[in-house]
Image (cartoon, rainbow, N blue to C red):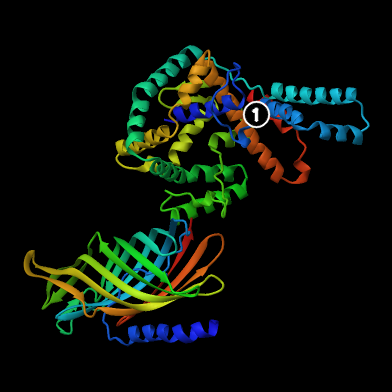
Amino acid sequence: MKFYLSMIVCVFVLCAQGLAYGQETSFTVGPQDESVSQQIVSSAKATPDLTSEDQSKTASNNPTDELSEDYHEDEILEEYAAKIKEEKVEIADPLEPLNRVFHEFNDKLYFWALKPVAQGYKAVVPEPARVSVKNFFSNLAFPARFLSCLLQADFSGAATEAGRFTINTLWGIGGLMDPSSGKELNLQKQDTDLGQTLGVWGVGQGFYIVWPVFGPYSFRDTVILAGDYFIYPVSYINPWYASWGVRAYEEVNATSLRIGDYEALKDAAIDPYVAFRDAYAQYRFKKIKARKTKLTLSAPAAQQGKPADAELLNKEN
Amino acid sequence: MKKKILTIYFPVMLLMVVSALAIPPRADASGLFGPLQTVSREQGGLNTAVGYLYHEDTYENGESYRVKQNEIYSQAAYGAKNIWEIYGRVGVSNMKLSGIFASSDHFVETSKDDFEADWEFFGALGAKVFYPINAVFGVGAFMQGTYYFTDFSDHASITSGGVPIKTEMKFENLWDADFGIGLQAQLPCGAKLYAGPYIYYSEADMSLSSDWTGTEYTKKDHTVSNQSMAGGFLGADIPLIRGFRLNVEGQFADRFSAGLAVSYTY
């Protein structure tokens, strides 16, 4: 079920990177998803924004000559290039032939079953209702996020999650609404899971594996799939087929909110399998890096300054 | 000006409260009525609340039954323009009827005296309108209906002359309807004080069945309703932080009920 979730995540990652194949898409990417390549584009755009008057003022205030400015720009570009090189994450794929078969199976499952059902559902259920359903399931998934924060020693994140769950359950009509994310309360969802927890602990991602129905995972995240299953309350609905029915409904609802994204990525990629694989690896790397950065910033000053990125990259590879 | 407003409206408000409390009612309603004016944003929006009410009531049909309930509920409301609101409420309630199994006959022993039922679900729908008289005072009206989806039931063993009898009592299809009017005063800190009278009707099917050595020998069904139909309410709605508000309310009929709710305005 998480296959499509992972796919959409891949969409965002690839869009954020301007797509490795140099093609543009219509997706909008939030500031938090801005990649290094986008930063380069942004910085390149920022410079011409200066008016000639501003530039002359700058020149008159700074006695450095144009040559040194060029050198400075080169240094910046080299720095960004180094970052790009540093963040290039690859994942071992010893099961590629089998993975491609499962990738194709999941692709057909999406186009032949999930998408038509989601389109029908979208036609009859208004968007606010579907967003509320999404909020409800997101609220139910609180235990995994809470436990992950605790296991990462991110106590402020755990407290935020506990607060969100309490407020959204009581004043959000059982989680259908999300008042916690509003301007006044500003308790944002902690974007973490048990797979990221292992990553933060230093466990490498292992090899790439595509599961039928569930979608792309690394070996590390596959192990965690079971853990996520056991701490998701929906898993405990009896009988078992009711539980899977609820999960299927959750997936249909989620898909109805993002129809078209998967298609866009697939159409943009020369080899969709490779595109999804690389995007998955990049996405997970960035998530874990973000968690590590957050923990590093909240850690005592003595622990700061460690080359966390390089260390993480080595582990990931 | 302020003094004049107080001079004019305070006696009216006081008269309403006094008249409400002076009526000799025998019943009250379930759930907080809340402030007469919606707490939703003026351009229209949701507000939600979580509330608790300790509630006492008296039902009758030949005999009188004093009912005690603890109610916990969640409410969603939509209001606009500071003048109207509709709301829905779901919650759970327990029930206790004191001394209903007790017997004055010394030869009859009962396993317990009180009827005590576990938490059962209820739902309520309501609407309120408000008319501001000026910046401080306004009058409003509300109506609210409540229905209990599940039945309250309890068992007791009665021994009469050495013969054990199993008795089951049920309180079924309980519902109520309320209509009230009131006066509200807005304080400078954003708090709202409100009070007024209300009328009320509640009804339930009450059944008592007993088995004597496996044979049903007694079954008694009848409808019970509240003894009287009027009461008064008095409450305050106080702003807290970050969009939350505290609502405290008392309702008085033949018994006193009180509760509180914390609401959040989207």
How crowded pointer 1 is (Cα within 10 Å; few <14, some 14-19, many 20+) is rated as some
Please name the amino acid that badge 1 sits on: Ser
**Could you say which quadrant of the image residue A129 lies in?**
top left
Q: Which residue is mark 1?
A: A35
Residue A69 drawn above or below residue B121:
above
Q: Is residue A269 left or right of residue B221?
A: right
Which of B3 and B107 lies nearest the eye of the viewer? Answer: B3
Residue B137 drawn above or below residue B21:
above
Residue B123 position in % (x across, y down): 30, 60
The residue under the point 54% across, 44% down is A189
Q: Is residue A177 left or right of residue A162?
A: left
Element under label 1?
A: loop
Q: Is residue B5 left or right of residue A305?
A: left
Which of B212 and A262 lies nearest the eye of the viewer? Answer: A262
**Could you say which quadrant of the image residue A52 lies in?**
top right
Residue A150 position in % (x across, y down): 58, 46
Residue A93 drawn above or below residue A246:
above
The residue under the point 56% across, 31% down is A28
Residue A56 position in % (x across, y down): 86, 32
Q: Is residue A250 left or right of residue B105?
A: right
